[in-house]
């Protein structure tokens, strides 16, 4: 017998119904759309003109008390009013990545052409799954994929790619293709074949690789973390030794996932050596260049990615080092045929019979309905050009190199390893105040928290071998050495204060 179930009756308060003919964007409402958009832009522009700190340092509780008060069943009745309400709810306490004292995560300030292009993306609301929902948009995306493939050094005729929501999705898709490639070569039941697959990445690789192993049914432990050298690059010798051992134990090396620009240290794994090992064991060779992809545009530093052209697949996050708004990312593959193992054809959408004749991107994507994010990069390249973006990335690399001296000058700060891309990871340790590891870690967390609460600056933290470290991620070409120097001074000042409190026992 079925249990009697029913949805609760709707209980909306008695408010006048909105005018639907004014709510929907259409020919008749173009003027309303224009007016509301101008207001929205004006309110953001006003905010940008006055922001002078990355944050006001709100706590989750402070924000929750405001946001929870809003009654979503009681509309304000106009776009202008709901935007005005956002000043207090969101804009005033938002985190501003463009502020030169923002040095926390891998968030870049964004170029204006890309931001403005967003208006087209959302308003026209093209969906990228099929040509019949996107028309020129599909061809624009494909041209950008070719452009990126050429930057990587792929043969653009052979190569292909797809825009994704971010590096996490790109890495998942790369590992999916690698898994399908590996299982096609094996015998036995599918569970048996999956159980033996291994993915090799460095212990500094992004967690999305390990997560992909889990999502793909391989289990977390299928992602093997290989030790790194003093610069946090994957140790090729250790990799080879581990694979030999695993193969002897009956395991199958499915993929080697190299990182070009690790999230913490910006380390670039030795691509040519890793490619060779992948060849030797018939493994897929993926390069996660979510962060390091900006080097592709840099005349001065491009050579650091030598070997990337030999990768079977590459993750690029334009929203990290091409100064694009979120989301803007892609997965590139050396050979277009790599997408065949993941292609699906739905009669209602992209029938197989039409596959050859119609450029439908959905068969290459993990998403179905998909935003036209590619347009932001298109308008950027047409407005500013690739060289300009490359020069901007060069600028942050140079800044990070100079900043290294600034850290070295301060006796309380100890850099963990040389700067490699645009991050600095260091410990706050006062030679006069030796601490236990747990005290040290508590102080590091306190420094970061107090800096945030003060709104003075935002920095990140990471943990290496149990030790809490402070991290600056520099991705803003407007940030100067004196900005960095002020952040470092603030860290030393707050750290010294916390140590003094520890000594006197006060709070
Ligand atoms: C940021 C990052 C990712 C994840 O990318 P998202 O765009 O945040 O999903 C993957 N790999 C590396 C090396 C990263 O730095």
Image: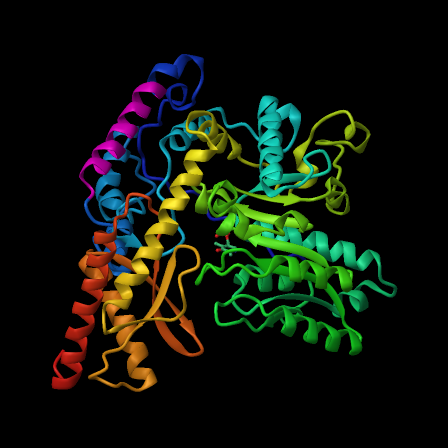
Furthest residue in direction top, as rendered: 28
Q: Residue at x 28, y 47 (%)?
A: 479
Q: Which of 259 and 249 is in front in this view?
A: 259
Q: Nearer the viewer, residue 445 or 400?
A: 400
Picture coordinates of residue 333, whole percent (x, y): 67, 44
Q: Residue at x 32, y 77 (%)?
A: 441
Magenta region:
33-51
Furthest residue in direction right, as rendered: 187
Asked if residue 446 is positioned above or below residue 330 in the image, the reply reads below
Q: Is residue 463 left or right of residue 253?
A: left
> In which quadrant of the rendered image does the C terminus lie?
bottom left
The reply to whether residue 5 is visible in this rendering is: no
Picture coordinates of residue 4, whole percent (x, y): 59, 54
Asked if residue 438 is positioned above or below residue 90 in the image, the reply reads below
Q: How many marks?
A: 0
Q: Which of 78 and 309 is in front in this view?
A: 309
Q: Nearer the viewer, residue 422 or 347?
A: 422
Q: Residue at x 68, y 50 (%)?
A: 310
Q: Is residue 423 left or right of residue 203?
A: left
Picture coordinates of residue 361, whole percent (x, y): 66, 34
């Amino acid at each position: 017998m079925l249990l009697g179930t029913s949805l609760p009756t709707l209980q909306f308060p008695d408010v006048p119904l909105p005018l639907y003919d004014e709510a929907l964007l259409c020919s008749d409402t173009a003027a309303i759309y224009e007016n509301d958009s101008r207001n929205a832009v004006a309110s953001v522009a006003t905010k940008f003109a006055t922001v002078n700190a990355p944050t006001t340092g709100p706590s989750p509780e402070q924000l929750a008390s405001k946001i929870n008060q809003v009654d979503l069943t009681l509309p304000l009745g106009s776009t202008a009013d709901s935007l005005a309400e956002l000043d207090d709810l969101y804009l005033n306490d938002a985190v501003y990545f463009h502020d030169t004292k923002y040095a926390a995560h891998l968030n870049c300030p964004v170029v204006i052409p890309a931001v403005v292009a967003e208006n087209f993306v959302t308003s026209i609301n093209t969906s990228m799954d099929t040509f019949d929902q996107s028309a020129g948009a599909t061809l624009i995306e494909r041209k950008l994929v070719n452009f990126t493939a050429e930057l990587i050094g792929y043969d653009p005729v052979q190569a292909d790619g797809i825009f994704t929501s971010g590096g996490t999705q790109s890495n998942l898709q790369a590992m999916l293709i690698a898994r399908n490639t590996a299982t096609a070569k094996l015998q036995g039941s599918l569970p048996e074949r999956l159980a033996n697959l291994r993915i090799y990445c460095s212990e500094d690789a992004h967690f999305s690789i390990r997560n992909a192993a889990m999502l793909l049914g391989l289990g977390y432990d299928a992602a093997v973390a290989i030790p790194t050298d003093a610069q946090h690059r994957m140790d090729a010798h250790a990799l080879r030794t581990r694979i030999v051992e695993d193969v002897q134990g009956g395991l199958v090396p499915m993929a080697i996932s190299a990182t070009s620009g690790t999230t913490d240290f910006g380390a670039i794994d030795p691509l040519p050596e890793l490619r060779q090992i992948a060849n030797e064991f018939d493994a897929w060779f993926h390069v996660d260049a979510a962060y390091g992809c900006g080097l592709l545009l840099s005349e001065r530093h491009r050579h650091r990615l030598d070997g990337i052209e030999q990768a079977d697949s590459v993750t690029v996050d334009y929203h990290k080092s091409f100064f694009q708004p979120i989301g803007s990312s892609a997965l590139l593959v050396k050979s277009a045929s790599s997408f065949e193992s993941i292609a699906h054809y739905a009669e209602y959408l992209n029938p197989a019979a039409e596959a050859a004749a119609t450029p439908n991107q959905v068969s290459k994507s993990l998403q179905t309905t998909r935003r036209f994010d590619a347009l932001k990069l298109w308008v950027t390249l047409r407005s500013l050009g690739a060289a300009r973006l490359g020069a901007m990335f060069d600028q942050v690399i140079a800044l990070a190199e100079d900043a290294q001296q600034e850290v070295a000058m301060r006796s309380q700060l100890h850099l963990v390893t040389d700067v490699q891309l645009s991050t600095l990871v260091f410990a706050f340790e006062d030679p006069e105040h030796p601490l236990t590891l747990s005290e040290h870690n508590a102080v590091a967390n306190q420094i970061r928290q107090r800096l945030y609460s003060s709104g003075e600056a935002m920095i990140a933290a990471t943990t290496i071998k149990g030790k809490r470290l402070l991290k600056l991620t520099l991705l803003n070409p407007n940030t100067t050495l004196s900005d960095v120097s002020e952040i470092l001074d603030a860290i030393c000042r707050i750290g010294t204060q916390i140590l003094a409190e520890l000594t006197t026992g006060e709070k």
